[in-house]
């Protein structure tokens, strides 16, 4: 377990997001602070209702920060610098990963909830 220091920039390291996608697939890690609404939509939101090519993919939180990369192999490590605001008391943070294969197949991971602060 790591402790966060208020007002100091730290790093969230997410490892082992294993999508079983071919090398060269585009992958992204989204970070948000709200799991109830995003752009006026109630969450979780089934992406396939507006993009039928993405079945069984759900957005589970808002997307305040999006880190994009390319898959080198089966898994990928993301480092996200994050400053803990002064006075933060168990600030909720939500993570979700996405991947799109060169052929256009889209994947979304389950969500992960964290709390940062004192």
Image (cartoon, rainbow, N blue to C red):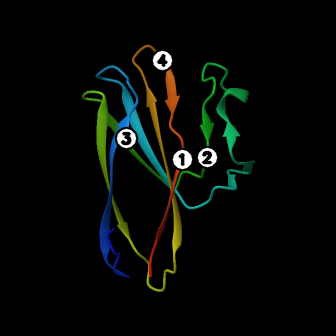
* Residue placed furthest toward the bottom: 87
Horizontal side of 80 relative to 62 (left or right) equals: left
Which label is found at residue 68? Answer: 3
Instruction: Name the residue tied to disc 1.
Output: 111
- Find residue 81 and report its horizontal and vertical position in percent: 32, 62
Residue 109 in the image: state x and y as whole percent: 50, 37
Could you tell which of marks 1 and 3 lies nearer the N-terminus?
3
- Between label 2 and label 4, give the one nearer the viewer: 2
Taking the spot 30% from the left edge, 68% from the top edge, the residue there is 10
Q: Is residue 80 left or right of residue 44?
A: left
Quarter the C terminus occupies:
bottom left
Specify which label sits upstream in the sequence, 2 or 4. Answer: 2
In which image quadrant can residue 22 be found?
top left
Q: Quadrant of residue 99?
A: top left
Residue drawn at (60%, 31%) of the image: 57
Q: Nearer the viewer, mark 2 or mark 3?
A: 2
- The answer to whether the residue labelled 2 contacts the one labelled 4, judged by CB atoms less than 8 Å apart, is no
Secondary structure, mark 2, is: loop
Sequence-wise, which precedes: disc 2 or disc 1? 2
**Residue displayed at 39% across by 17% down:** 102
Q: Secondary structure at mark 4?
A: loop
**Could you give the CA–CA distance between mark 4 and mark 3, rounded to whole angstroms?**
16 Å
Q: Identify the secondary structure beneath mark 1.
A: loop
Q: Are marks 2 and 1 in contact (CB under 8 Å)?
A: yes
Residue positioned most to the top: 103
Left or right of 104 in this view: 61: right
Question: What number is the disc on residue 60?
Answer: 2
- Check residue 104 in the rendering and tell me which mark sits there, or answer none: 4
Choose the circle earlier in sequence order: 1 or 4: 4
Separation (CA) of disc 1 from disc 3 = 17 Å
- Viewer-side residue, 1 vs 18: 1
């Amino acid at each position: 377990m790591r402790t966060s220091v208020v007002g100091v920039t730290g790093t969230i390291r997410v490892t082992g997001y294993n999508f079983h996608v071919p090398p060269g697939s585009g992958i992204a890690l989204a970070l948000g602070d709200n799991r109830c609404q995003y752009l006026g939509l109630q969450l979780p939101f089934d992406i396939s209702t507006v993009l039928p090519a993405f079945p069984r993919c759900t957005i589970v939180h808002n997307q305040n920060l999006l880190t994009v990369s390319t898959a080198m192999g089966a898994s990928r490590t993301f480092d996200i610098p994050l400053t803990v605001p002064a006075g933060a008391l168990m600030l909720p943070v939500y993570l979700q990963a996405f991947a799109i294969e060169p052929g256009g197949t889209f994947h979304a991971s389950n969500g992960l909830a964290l709390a940062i602060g004192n």
